[in-house]
Amino acid sequence: AQSVTQLDSQVPVFEEAPVELRCNYSSSVSVYLFWYVQYPNQGLQLLLKYLSGSTLVKGINGFEAEFNKSQTSFHLRKPSVHISDTAEYFCAVSNMRFGAGTRLTVKP
Amino acid sequence: GAVVSQHPSWVICKSGTSVKIECRSLDFQATTMFWYRQFPKQSLMLMATSNEGSKATYEQGVEKDKFLINHASLTLSTLTVTSAHPEDSSFYICSAPIAGGSYEQYFGPGTRLTVT
């Protein structure tokens, strides 16, 4: 079975600081990996996805993630965050299973 | 781009009544849709896979007689919470996969159900 673990439930950062949201996966077969963002009382929006090919994936809103097979990780990064990035972020695998989520709070 | 809508966006009902939530794919056909439940400050829990023209597939621990799913057309799936109780209060989200087998999904905006 496939699963993901998000290592941080909350990540507070100051505006314009870099951020990394961690995700580790478990799978015995090839996986597709996704990062979604959820704003309050809304559905999920796809940030980026890894299907195959280049391990560095660029997404919307300046986010990127790196697929690391040896470390079974797919961490999400942004070099400089904005207040508007405050939201819940979910890592997911191809079997529609989601991590517990990381609440990113960007402070002025 | 593709859009998935849900109706209603929020609903309040009394304990013991039933509530129907609609999930529509607006500009594409979806033979499969997924229903999730999300408790406050928690992740999405997959409840069931809705299949057009056939019975839904429920995840372990989800009561199929309580959460009735009907996928009557290629653009509409419905979730009916029967005999709702306060513990059924939650945020319900549906999604539909895009074509191509990449497992990427389009998510609906969600429906907030409050049972009083």
Image (tube, coloured by chain):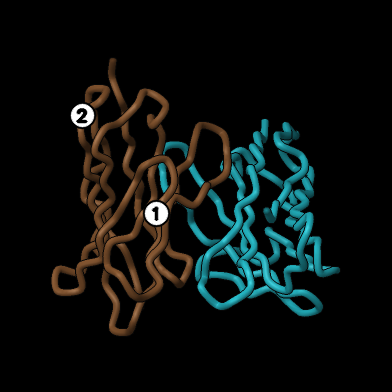
Chain colours: A brown, B cyan
Q: Tell if the residue under mark 2 belongs to the same chain as the one under mark 1.
A: yes
Q: Position of residue B74 (x, y in %)?
A: 81, 69
Q: Position of residue B58 (x, y in %)?
A: 60, 71
Res. A25 image quadrant:
bottom left
User: Going by the picture, which residue comes out furthest to the right?
Assistant: B73
Q: Is residue A50 left or right of residue B113?
A: left
**Residue A107, numbered label:** none
Dot 2 corresponds to which residue? A17
Position above or below: B115 against A95: above
Q: Position of residue B73 (x, y in %)?
A: 85, 68
Q: Say which amino acid is labelled 2.
A: Ala
**Residue A35, numbered label:** 1
**Sooner in the amino-acid sequence: mark 2 or mark 1:** 2
User: Going by the picture, which residue comes out furthest to the bottom?
Assistant: A29
Q: Position of residue A84 (x, y in %)?
A: 42, 26
**Closer to viewer: mark 2 or mark 1:** 2
Please name the residue shown 66% across and 41% down the image: B111
Please name the residue shown 79% across and 68% down the image: B71
